[in-house]
Amino acid sequence: MNDFPKEKQIILFDGVCNLCNDFVLKVIKYDKKNNFLFTSLQSKTGEEILAHLNIDTTKIDSIILFEPTSTYYIKSSAALKIMNSFGSVWKLTYFFWLIPKPLRNLAYDFIAKNRYRWFGKKEQCMIPTPELTSKFLN
């Protein structure tokens, strides 16, 4: 397994999903502390991390937040951890932790199941602009 920067958190996302790509661009915009790196679930690095974590994407079709020094989060927990890190008004997302995880994930799964139909799908994974290349793992 690659030696990932220990001070960074890695977001694994569906690289062909328009909603997921928009989410990644929003994270980049609000990540003022430069906490995150990105890789698609379909990439070589993504597949390597998934194998390391023993995650089967046929059972978990989700955003994954991987913290190389400790653990990982999936579905609504990953999204909330990411948004909570932005600070400012984003701290209000802490209230969603009060909702039981099964209910949060039910809503997450409903959106995930319909994301291609509602938001569309790309033919290939997003190719970052030259300015953003340093935020993506191959």
Image: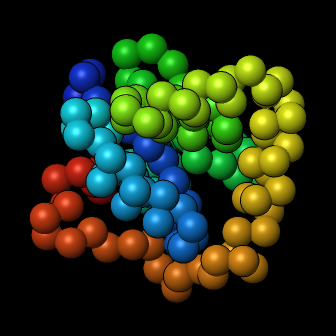
- On the image, the x and y values in percent for residue 60 come to 73, 45
Please tell me in which quadrant of the rendered image residue 103 appears.
top right
Q: Which one is nearer the viewer's eye here, 64 or 93?
A: 93
Please tell me in which quadrant of the rendered image residue 119 appears.
bottom right
Q: In the picture provided, is 101 more to the left or to the right than 44?
A: right
- On the image, the x and y values in percent for residue 126 come to 39, 72
Quadrant in which the N terminus appears: top left
Against 71, residue 87 (above or below) is below
Q: In the picture provided, is 77 more to the left or to the right than 31?
A: right
Residue appearing at x 53%, y 82% in the figure = 122
Residue appearing at x 37%, y 30% in the figure = 87
- On the image, the x and y values in percent for residue 115 come to 70, 69
Residue 88 visible in this rendered orientation of the protein:
yes
Furthest residue toward bottom: 123
Furthest residue toward left: 131
Residue appearing at x 73%, y 58% in the figure = 112
- On the image, the x and y values in percent for residue 111 come to 76, 59
Q: Which one is nearer the viewer's eye here, 136 or 97?
A: 97
Residue 57 visible in this rendered orientation of the protein:
no
In the rendered picture of this protein, how many numbered marks are placed on residues? Answer: 0
Quadrant in which the C terminus appears: bottom left
Residue appearing at x 40%, y 56% in the figure = 26
Q: In the picture provided, is 115 more to the left or to the right than 106?
A: left
Q: In the picture provided, is 78 more to the left or to the right than 100?
A: left
The colour scheme applied to this rendered structure is rainbow
